[in-house]
Image (spheres, rainbow, N blue to C red):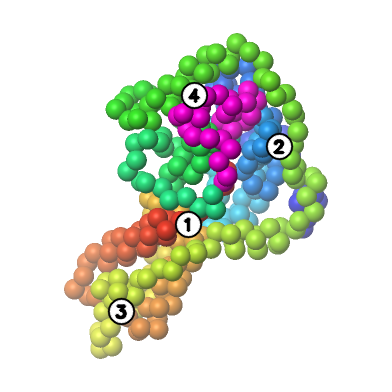
Amino acid sequence: MRFCDLALSIEGTPLKHRISTLYSELEDHGLRFKPHIWLSEEWFTPDEVPGFAIPFYLAHPRLARLERKQMLEVEGGTKRDCLRIMRHEAGHAIDNAYRLHTRRRYRELFGSFATPYPDWYKPKPTSRDFVLNLPAWYAQAHPAEDFAETFAVWLRGSGWRRHYAGWPALRKVEFIDDLMKEVSRRAPVNKSRERIEELSGITTTLFEHYQRKREHYAFKWPPDYDRAIKRIFVSEPNHNSAPAAGFLSRHRRELCHEVAEGTGAHHYAIDQMLSHMINRCRELKLRVDPAQDRTWQMVLVSLTIQTMNGILSGYHRIAL
Ligand SMILES: [Zn+2]
């Protein structure tokens, strides 16, 4: 099935209501600006466009199920996550609408908008120079992402002053607070209504799309869990305890979910790593240690460490 043949629209879906919520938040903050929004393959705000794209799978429950089946997660699938991402995209959109990145203070606080996008970024999880909105310390990916994330935190509104008290990142939110007061009195400089890669014009098929997407999110770091699994499981063939591979398979979903929540890495990458781990346990004929009652927690810690190693060595999760 080609995207252009899906005949989807935002009208009549829960997206309509979520977009209204975003627009009300902007209004409540005194902003007249409303980004235009259309359906495409993924979440993104194109360069120079004061609007953003929402992925097609949020416009139909059957496509959301397909997304979950192919990618093991639906990015923006819940109202809460959807709004988090929409606030972020609205940040890019308003940046483009008023060309905010050309200001000196923007450059001083966030860095240069013109910095080339890196293929990967190496986040510092303990840094207080950046706010937290999307997973994987995304504000650290690029100055434009830092601005969008800071805008999202500001727009969400509830208690950023208290939450970021004492953080150097507070200066960035305060800057946006002042900037938006000024901007609210003016009409946007860039009034383009351009829609880039709108779904109705895309001839790619769902099959090709998911082939590419799975390739993109595959883990690209060499996990080294042999030592860890040998410490967690035992190799005595005489034990009548459960095989380690079966144990991991039973807990696969839960483990994958926990590690994704904690690290911000994509479910698909973690699941793939777990699948390798399961095969390795099978090859080594490992079994659950009957004397160990915290096997689940030990696997969780080990997977989290492997995933963090991947993130710190430059695994790039998303480009929103
Ligand atoms: Zn972004």
Residue 309: % across, % down: 38, 60
Residue topped by disc 1: 315
Q: Is mark 4 on a helix, strand or loop?
A: helix
Is 62 displayed left or right of 168 in the figure? right
Residue 203: % across, % down: 80, 54
Q: In which quarter of the image is residue 71?
A: bottom right
Task: Give the distance between the C-alpha atoms of the residues marked 1 and 3, in whole angstroms.
Answer: 31 Å
Q: Which of marks 4 and 1 is nearer the N terminus?
A: 4
Q: Is residue 281 above or below residue 170?
A: below
Mark 1 nearby-residue class (10 Å; few <14, some 14–19, many ≥20): many
As drawn, the residue found furthest toward the left would be 291
Is 257 displayed left or right of 202 in the figure? left
Which dot marks residue 105? 4
Task: Give the distance between the C-alpha atoms of the residues marked 1 and 2, in whole angstroms.
Answer: 29 Å
- Residue located at (62% from left, 26% from top): 99
Q: Is mark 4 within 8 Å of ligand 1?
A: no
Which dot marks residue 38? 2
Indicate which label's residue lies in the foreground, 1 or 3.
1
